[in-house]
Image (tube, rainbow, N blue to C red):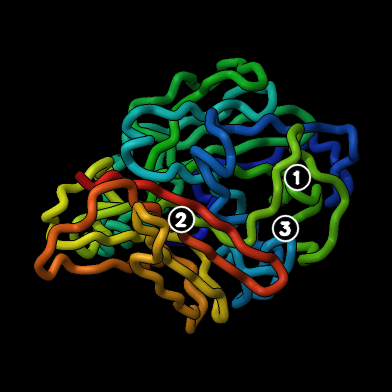
């Protein structure tokens, strides 16, 4: 999720005179895109933002007419769960065979202040480190927020489909490690989930252009875990590892969870189950306003006097939205 819309035209995009695509819908058999990140979607990486397909200047709608996007967002954001994953190195792959038109490297992956984000935006470097691939017939793919010094290609290189071209980073206008992937035909942003131009509006479909079926995710739970105190969410953003064990005399036993694109009316239930199967702590929260940026909740209990009972505690997050059911994730911790 970029803090601002990635302004592709400001980086290096133009469509040559040889553009042969004549409609906003791409023909069904014209192309199929390989997934551009070396991760398992829904497990080691997540879809955080879709393409904004609402032409209204002040609105933001994804292709399912929900709000899992930002205004004028020209692409899809595939995010890693933490900066630790980024630092371990996760490959970005060419979605199609093609030729490298432009590259940019050297932009920092550091966590930035609001003032630094503004400076980046004013300098038209929202994309950070990026690669533009040309696939002929006016078709291009674009890869943003790449990790500094990870680019494996240069302008003029020919790449194969699925070839490693860089790593996922947090350069440019990025609040967390992710790949911003864009598909362009005749200077039009194409939503790969529908095969239609981003100006066509939501609820319309021509063809899913992904080679593998990528499910729609109306909301995204990015992580959860246990701590011995109310969590420092800045440390979570940095990728601080959740402990595997806690001592019985810990100051507290706390279960936390974080997610993107909370919508007013969503329900979040955090539950801790004790080693004997009893409910140690449970809280349900109702989201009171739409939130595009990350949200964090936690529940738990202080250690007032007696040590916590030894054994394995289970934390369960249940995230519910009307019309989409529930998503549940669990985490365990050993108390010794």
Q: Indicate the position of residue 8 as horizontal and vertical percent values.
A: 55, 49
Give the residue displayed 47% in from the left and 69% down from the top: 269
Q: Earlier in the sequence, mark 2 or mark 1?
A: 2
Residue occupied by mark 1: 186
Compared across the picture, whether 323 is left or right of 235 comes to right
Return the mark for residue 198.
3
**Secondary structure state at the residue bearing disc 3:** loop
Residue 89 in the image, given as x and y percentages of width and height: 38, 27
- Residue 113 picture location, percent across and down: 24, 59
The local secondary structure at tag 2 comes to loop
Q: Residue at x 81, y 65 (%)?
A: 203
Pointer 2 local density, CA inside 10 Å: few below 14, some 14–19, many at least 20: many
Residue 312 x/y as whole percent = 33, 47
Answer with left or right where residue 310 lies relative to residue 286.
Answer: left
Categorize mark 3 by other alpha carbons within 10 Å: few (<14), some (14-19), many (20+): many
Quarter containing the C terminus = top left
Residue at left 18%, top 62%? 252
**Which residue carries the number 2 mark?**
2
Along the horizontal axis of the image, is 37 left or right of 216? left
Q: Nearer the viewer, residue 328 or 22?
A: 328
């Amino acid at each position: 999720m970029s803090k601002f819309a990635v302004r592709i035209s400001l980086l290096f995009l133009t469509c040559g005179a040889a553009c042969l695509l004549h409609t906003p819908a791409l023909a069904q058999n014209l192309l199929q895109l390989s997934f551009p990140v070396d991760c398992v979607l829904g497990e080691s990486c997540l879809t955080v933002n879709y393409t904004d397909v609402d032409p209204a200047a002040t609105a933001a709608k994804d292709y399912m007419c929900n709000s899992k996007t930002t205004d004028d967002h020209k692409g899809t954001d595939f995010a890693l769960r933490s900066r630790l994953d980024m630092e371990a190195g996760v490959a970005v792959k060419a979605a199609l065979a093609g030729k490298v038109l432009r590259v940019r490297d050297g932009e920092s992956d550091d966590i930035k202040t609001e003032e630094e984000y503004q400076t980046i935006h004013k300098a038209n470097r929202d994309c950070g480190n990026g690669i533009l691939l040309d696939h002929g017939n006016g078709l291009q793919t674009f890869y943003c927020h790449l990790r500094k010094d990870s680019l494996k290609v240069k302008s003029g290189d020919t790449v194969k489909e699925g070839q490693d071209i860089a790593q996922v980073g947090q350069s440019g206008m990025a609040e967390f490690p992710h790949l911003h992937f864009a598909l362009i035909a005749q200077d039009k942003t194409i939503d790969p989930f529908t095969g239609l131009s981003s100006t066509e509006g939501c609820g319309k479909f021509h063809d899913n252009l992904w080679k593998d079926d990528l499910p729609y995710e109306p909301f995204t739970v990015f992580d959860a875990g246990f701590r011995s105190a109310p969590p420092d969410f800045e440390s979570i953003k940095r990728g601080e590892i959740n402990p595997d064990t806690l001592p019985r005399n810990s100051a507290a036993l706390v279960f936390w969870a974080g997610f993107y694109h909370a919508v007013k009316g969503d329900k979040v239930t955090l539950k801790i189950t004790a080693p004997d199967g009893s409910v140690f702590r449970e809280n349900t929260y109702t989201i009171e306003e739409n939130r595009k940026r990350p949200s964090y909740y936690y529940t738990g209990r202080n250690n007032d006097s007696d040590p916590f009972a030894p054994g394995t505690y289970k934390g369960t997050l249940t995230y519910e939205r009307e019309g989409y059911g529930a998503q549940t994730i669990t985490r365990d911790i050993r108390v010794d």
